[in-house]
Amino acid sequence: MKVITHGAAREVTGSCHEIQVAGKRILLDCGLFQGKRQESATKNSTFNFNPASDIDVMILSHAHMDHVGRVPLLWKKGYRNKIHCTYATKDLSAVMLSDGGYIQEKDEEFHCKYLQKSMIKCDGPLYTQKDAIACMALFKGQNYDEWFDVIPGIVKCKLIDAGHVLGAAMVLLDVTENGVSRHIAFSGDVGRNTLPIIRDPASMPPVEFLICESTYGDRVHDDMAHAKDKLRDIIIKTAKRGGKVIIPAFSLERTQQLVYDLHLLWDAKEIPPMPIIIDSPLASKVTDVFMKHPECYDKSMFDEFLNRAHNPFQFSLVHYTDSVEESKELNGKPGPMIIMAGSGMCEAGRIRHHLKNEIEEPKNTILAVGFMAKDTLGARIIDPTVTSVKIFDKEYQKRAEIQYIDTYSGHADMRDLDAYIQSIEGLKKIMLVHGEETQMQSFATRIKTYKEGCEVFMPAKEQELEV
């Protein structure tokens, strides 16, 4: 049995791993790369396998674009086999990929019209909305904690709650080869025990081999209890200046977490009355999906809202925009105001327009609330050594106040990851993925201190590993 990492090898985005067993090939995730534009464009457009003939089946951990974002390209290039995932991930993927196709079309249109000098070539979008809609025919929903056949007689799978975003799963595989059965697993993105809305991560049963994320392999999050207080303080401070709080937020999970906390703050009268604009049609659609999957909720969601027939994602201050015209009208409106828009790393979507218009105003605050991959616009914005950023090929000075709350991250931090690995019995080999090399190295060093005899690998892209 072999494992090959096609993406997220010593980097955070582009999750894509392959398992080869008994002449069959299984793909785990197929996500978008993010970072330097030309480099990401090249990575995103090519596969080191033939989607039409080489891959027998795919299993998807969750619906974030760095895990699901290239599935329409698989379809476009001829892949027609099943994609297994949870029911919530299936529903979320439908709206995420359709929006992704729209962004691909619009970005290609913009680049070809204005930025040809900075693009490799303009030969059509990576995929279209039509491709995104068509590929959904391949998705097959599965329940948590129930075995199903992936390759009959060879591989069966169980999806285990990862506690990362709605529907996110760890992938447990029971593999039989040459009469020998073993358990191998893929962590997907491991969540945290203190996140609101969704359940905490479940325990991983004994496995021999684990493909494990390492996003925060050497970082500790602040206490989740302090996030709401810091959010409140930033809002009050900015409102006193008459400014706007501009929040780049992933439409999936991060936006819902923030609206949840803003709702609690408003109910407690801890923030002033001010418009809260969710300027993301995608976030609105994702929020609708959240309301359809209460099986994923934790106890606090029921205690705070659902038991009182209270919608956690809607209250008097909140407005979800529908049209581009509504979004444009926000530019001329004075603060105080909160504007939340995608994408979370500022690489696409409406947030770039708001940043362009608001980042040079000292009254405003740009509030980052999630991980920013290396070389993304978001990473440059939160970097205190960077004084200006390029948006739509024009340089803008960072005059707005820049704040960062990484407590809202849906990823396990180093303490969570250590506890996760320590709890898994029978581990003989671990392959670290989905992390910057410095984070991986620190995590690997610690693993060797508490998992004696366990081999730890940090594969390069396309490196094959014998299991």
Image (spheres, grey):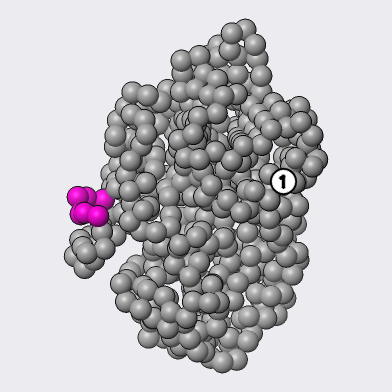
Taking depth in this image into account, of 444 and 193 the one nearest to the observer is: 444
In the image, residue 438 lies in the stretch drawn in magenta: no
Total marks shown come to: 1
Is residue 434 something one can see in this rendering?
Answer: yes
For label 1, the crowd category at 10 Å Cα-Cα, with few meaning under 14, some 14 to 19 and many 20 or more, is few
**For this view, does 242 lie left or right of residue 346?**
right
Q: Quadrant location of residue 342?
A: bottom left
- Looking at the image, the residue that sits furthest to the top is 179
Taking depth in this image into account, of 333 and 189 the one nearest to the observer is: 189
> Which stretch did the figure color magenta?
120-125
Q: Which residue is at 39% across, 43% downward?
A: 70
- The percent position of residue 102, horizontal first and vertical second, equals 32, 54
Residue tagged by mark 1? Answer: 445
Q: Which residue is at 34% across, 67% downward?
A: 323
**For this view, does 406 lie left or right of residue 252?**
right
Is residue 318 something one can see in this rendering?
Answer: no
- The percent position of residue 388, horizontal first and vertical second, equals 43, 79
